[in-house]
Image (cartoon, grey):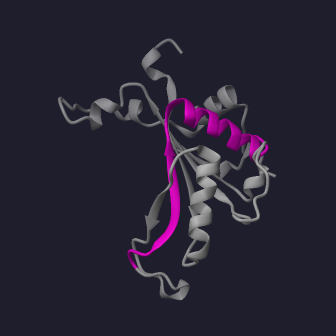
Amino acid sequence: MANPMQEIKLDKLTINIGIGNNEDKLENAKALLKKLTGREAAYTRAKKRFPEFGIRKGQIIGTLVTLRNKQAQEFLKNALEAANNTLGSNAVANNSVNFGIKEYIEFSGVKYDPKIGMLGLNVNASFARKGVRVETRKRRSSKVGVKHRSITKEELREFLKKNFGARVGEAE
């Protein structure tokens, strides 16, 4: 690309484990995220009540960790490797990529821990271009054009293929 401001970068990576109303697995999920990322996990709470699932509004239903910069790059590379570098066509949306890993033992170098049990996780990667912060910062915020703010699916597929070796739309 000729314009360096048009470069796409990984903004943040969010790793989420949803537990539902099973509070026994909550500490196991938190320990798993600590084991995988080295960071302390935060709790997620239900925004609505779902009586058919036994979930109340405000009840803790999962854990998540947000990673940025080099740590996010490394984890995304490992997560894509755990998913066989293959993503479904629906995994890529404008400005983000979402995919799940069914079992944490698919990560290379991670062994099964009987204390934790078998848990899966969701990975959400958000992408942005340089200069988008101009719109969200507190002081001297300004408008950013729609073409600069949004990253199309095709651009994101090319970025993932080039930087992470991911194959998009070829899910197993």
Q: Relative to residue 159, is residue 51 drawn left or right?
A: left
Q: Residue at x 75, y 46 (%)?
A: 107
The residue range painted magenta reads 57-85
Q: Residue at x 38, y 74 (%)?
A: 58
Question: Which is more toward the observer, 5 or 72?
Answer: 72
Residue 143, position as x, y percentages in the image = 25, 33
Q: Is residue 85 above or below residue 21?
A: above
Q: Relative to residue 109, is residue 162 drawn left or right?
A: left
Residue 77, position as x, y percentages in the image = 67, 36
Instruction: Look at the image and tell me whether residue 86 can be seen.
Output: yes
Q: Residue at x 71, y 65 (%)?
A: 115
- Farthest-out residue, top: 2
The answer to which quarter of the image holds residue 131 is top left
Q: Is residue 149 above or below residue 20?
A: above
The answer to which quarter of the image holds residue 44 is bottom left
Instruction: Look at the image and tell me whether residue 122 can be seen.
Output: no
Residue 96, position as x, y percentages in the image = 53, 44
In which quadrant of the rendered image does the N terminus lie?
Answer: top right
Residue 86, position as x, y percentages in the image = 75, 44
Question: Which is more toward the observer, 127 or 65?
Answer: 65
Label count reads: 0
Q: Relative to residue 93, is residue 87 drawn left or right?
A: right
Say whether residue 142 is magenta: no
Question: Which is more toward the observer, 137 or 59?
Answer: 59
